[in-house]
Image (cartoon, helix red, strand yellow):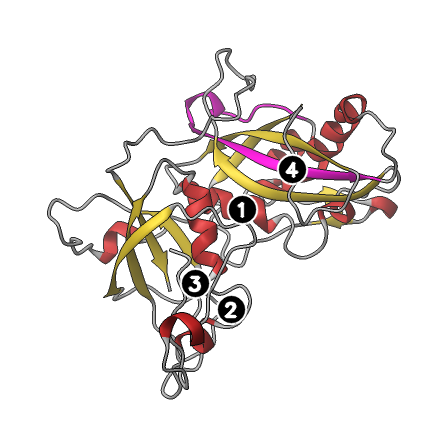
Amino acid sequence: SECPFEEPGTRKLLRGGRELGSDNPKYSIANTVLELQDRPGVQCNDASIQPCHRIVMKLELFLKGVEYVSTLMNMVYDVGLKRPVVVTLGVGAPYTVIDFVAINSGTRPPAATLAPTTSEEFLPLVYDPPTPQDCESIAIGLNLEGQDEMVVEFLDVEVDVTLDSDTLDIVSLLPSLEGVMKERLVPALSHCPFQEEGNRRRRLESENPKYVVANTFLRLEDRPGVSCSARSPQPCHRIVMKLQLFLKGHEYVSTLMNLVYDLRKDRPVVETLGLGSPYTAIDFVAINSGTPPSIPNTIAPTTIDSGIETTTKDEQTFLEDGV
């Protein structure tokens, strides 16, 4: 709720407390009900320090109005952005590390209290990795066998593009930029290698790949009148990368969002794309659920408001945060 909280060594909550503020707070959360639950049988991430235990932090968020679910997820991640969560909580031994590893949309409980959830409900499915033949088809933009019967999800990725001159027209650059993204990012989302300079092949892997994305249709659109993030260098232009994801099975939207964010984890996006002038920086600044296209196998334009869940002011949003 962007309120200060009391830390050790302080006596006054408001003056001596610490605020965990976002870079651009919207103050959309009025209050939160929080409950922790054990996750028996669910292992920690490979990157987590051992001995490790997985729990879930169940959040019931009371909002002042409608809000993107991705924005709410980012607010939770902001809690551990500037310093470790264990430091923010002010806890010492026996705790060594506490980390938020995944955030998923929760379910509305039948009663006023949060209902317990079985561990089987969250057990992740892992699919077979793509074959070399699949990767070849994906790289040249072909459909895969059975793709028309696959589960489809849509994501709108807000992208800030910084150019080295303010006289350049971003619209004229979109076709070539879209082509490069199709050559490199589309294979990466399916965990296929993509070609880099010098005949090197690079694979962008998640820590725990599930191989759920079989193929992806990608399209870029200009976002006239939409300003870039305050932290993006100028001159900057906002575009949207519209993704139509063909899945091997049902998957949390938040997991798909994390796959997209993984594309920028190891190095800047502009380097992954192998781009130089006129591109200075390219960054994914927000991801929202998209809308189905009106024409099969194409991605239709959406308005700025697409992806917002239509809820009333009195409704709540539920998030489940793997810890």
Q: Position of residue 226 (x, y in %)?
A: 63, 30
Q: Which quarter shows the N terminus?
A: bottom left
Judge from the rendering whether residue 100 lies leftward or rightward of residue 202; answer left or right.
left
Q: Are marks 2 and 3 in contact (CB under 8 Å)?
A: no
* In this picture, residue 66 sits left or right of residue 144: left
Foreground: disc 1 or disc 3 = 3
Q: Residue 100 has which mark?
A: 3
Mark 4 or mark 1: whose residue is earlier in sequence: 4
Three-letter code for the amino acid on which mark 1 is drawn: Leu
Q: Residue at x 87, y 37 (%)?
A: 278
Q: Which residues are magenta?
A: 141-163
In the depicted view, which residue is nearer to us: 13 or 115? 13
Q: Residues within 10 Å of mark 3 (few under 14, many from 20)?
A: some
Whether residue 127 is visible here, answered yes or no, is no
User: Of callouts 2 and 1, which one flags the residue occurring earlier in the amino acid sequence?
Assistant: 2
Q: Which residue is mark 4?
A: 159
| Pointer 2 residue | 47
Structural distance between the alpha carbons of marks 2 and 3: 12 Å
Quadrant location of residue 274?
top right
SS of the residue at dot 3? loop
- Please, is residue 107 above or below residue 99 in the view? above
Q: Return the disc, 2 or 3, that comes first in the chain's sequence.
A: 2
Q: Is residue 4 above or below residue 96?
A: above
Q: Amino acid at mark 4?
A: Val
Q: Nearer the viewer, mark 2 or mark 4?
A: 4
Q: Secondary structure at mark 4?
A: strand
Q: CA distance from mark 4 to mark 3?
A: 24 Å
Residue under numbered circle 1: 259
Query: Neighbour class for label 4 at 10 Å: few (<14), some, many (≥20)?
Result: many
Circle nearer the N terminus (1, 3) = 3
